């Protein structure tokens, strides 16, 4: 753990990490809290619609927010969006407390998704400027492990709070935490020193670079596999709450291997490591899909997490490496957008494949996706710098 201690000693890294962590935990809490709050008043269908609108608007607006942060400076854009996001949160909570119609709630959810400050992309884009190159792998590994941890801790925290207080109160509290984290990022000295860059790269921005497009496609296919695995877990558990054991095993494995990856230097280029990890993931998932036994699937999920844990770190390294300095925040915003898209398509496809109640189809679809990503990784070529 020496590398992580040295990383956190770099001025600004610890405070930035803590601030981003607040925002990510709040985001992970929001989905569950919002689903419960809307379901209690308007039913499951309306709750699903509301969360879908929030997610889609967020995914579409993300690259636009990232481009503005690159051009005008991240601090300025973050502060404006924190103000707009505060208004959106107040509107949403007010609509929940006054039992507003579903159409009003949908509008507030859209406003909330459109105004999310790009704190995460801004900090990821800042790492190459703030951290020495020989510590970047450790920084991205730490970031990825914390990101995975928030997706475990967020729903658990929200679930505990929902047992003790009304759902509307939990949603409001989530907003306070989210806004506090984003504001701390915006006011941090390292971000204040980062200036905007004149627009370059044309209308497409970072998408003008073929290897960036290829990398984003790979990330979308990778998260397609995760969407399949979410549905496969539910099918393996026969629709019961035991599905959580499968996804928790995957997440735990990913956190362990992700942190371990950042503690040393590994042989091979990032693209070669990505290809190897995804081929290993395909082999593990193929075993689960062909066997189908619940205990085998559980072990396969844990093993897949161990194999897949370093993948997000490598993806971040390549995004930062292949993207010019004036376009990094937008590029990282595109990462979040394609992840949402890939995950949504994965859950939709897998939902049709498990129509008979068996998880094999979804597991084999995830296997094929992992094999495809391995092939795409080999085409990324050498690092741009």
Image (cartoon, rainbow, N blue to C red):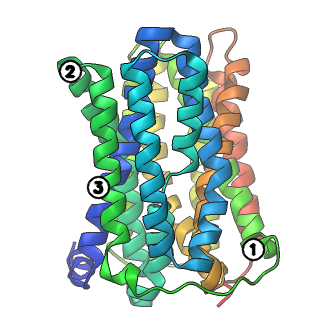
- Disc 2 from disc 3: Cα separation: 21 Å
- Disc 3 from disc 1: Cα separation: 30 Å
Q: Which mark is residue 84?
A: none
Residue 117 locus on image (x, y percent): 48, 58
Residue 52 is drawn in which quadrant? top right
**Relative to 244, 361 lies left or right:** right
Q: Is residue 365 above or below residue 39?
A: below
| Nearest to the observer: residue 187 or residue 312 | 187
Classify mark 3: helix, strand or loop: helix
- Disc 1 from disc 2: Cα separation: 45 Å
The residue labelled by disc 2 is 165
Nearer the observer, disc 3 or disc 1? 3
Mark toward the start of the polypeptide (3 vs 1) = 3
| Nearest to the observer: residue 373 or residue 211 | 211
The answer to whether marks 3 and 1 mark residues whose Cβ atoms lie closer than 8 Å is no
Q: Quadrant of the C terminus?
A: bottom right
The residue labelled by disc 3 is 180
Residue drawn at the location 47% of the way across and 19% of the way down: 294
Neighbour class for label 2 at 10 Å: few (<14), some, many (≥20)? few
Neighbour class for label 3 at 10 Å: few (<14), some, many (≥20)? some
């Amino acid at each position: 753990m020496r590398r992580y201690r040295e990383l956190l000693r770099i001025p600004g890294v610890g405070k930035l990490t803590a601030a981003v962590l607040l925002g990510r935990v709040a985001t992970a809490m929001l989905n569950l809290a919002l689903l419960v709050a809307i379901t209690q008043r308007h039913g499951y269908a309306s709750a699903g619609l509301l969360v879908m609108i929030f997610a889609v608007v967020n995914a579409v607006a993300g690259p636009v927010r990232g481009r503005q942060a690159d051009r005008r400076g991240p601090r300025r854009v973050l502060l404006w969006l924190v103000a707009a996001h505060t208004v959106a949160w107040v509107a949403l909570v007010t609509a929940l407390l006054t039992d507003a119609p579903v159409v009003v709630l949908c509008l507030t959810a859209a406003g909330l998704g459109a105004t999310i400050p790009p704190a995460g992309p801004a900090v990821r884009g800042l790492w190459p400027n703030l951290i020495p190159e020989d510590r970047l792998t450790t920084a991205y590994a730490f970031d990825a492990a914390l990101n995975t941890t928030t997706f475990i801790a967020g729903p658990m925290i929200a679930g505990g709070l929902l047992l003790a207080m009304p759902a509307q109160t939990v949603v409001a509290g989530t907003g306070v935490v989210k806004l506090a984290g984003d504001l701390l990022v915006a006011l941090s000295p390292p971000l204040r020193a980062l200036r905007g860059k004149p627009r370059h790269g044309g209308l497409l921005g970072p998408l003008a670079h073929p290897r960036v497009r290829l990398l984003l496609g790979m990330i979308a296919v990778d998260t397609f596999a995760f969407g399949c695995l979410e549905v496969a877990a539910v099918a393996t558990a026969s629709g019961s709450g035991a599905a959580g054991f499968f996804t928790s095993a995957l997440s735990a494995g990913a956190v362990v291997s992700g942190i371990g990856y950042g503690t040393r230097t590994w042989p091979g280029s990032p693209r070669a490591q990505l290809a190897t990890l995804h081929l290993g993931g395909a082999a593990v998932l193929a075993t689960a899909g062909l066997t189908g036994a619940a205990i085998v699937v559980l072990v396969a999920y844990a093993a897949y997490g161990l194999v897949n844990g370093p993948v997000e770190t490598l993806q971040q390294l390549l995004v930062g490496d292949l993207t010019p300095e004036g376009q990094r925040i937008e590029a990282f915003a595109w990462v979040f957008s394609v992840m949402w898209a890939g995950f949504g398509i994965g859950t939709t496809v897998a939902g049709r494949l498990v129509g008979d109640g068996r998880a094999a189809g979804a597991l084999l679809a995830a296997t094929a996706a992992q094999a495809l990503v391995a092939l795409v990784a080999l085409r990324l070529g050498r690092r741009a710098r």
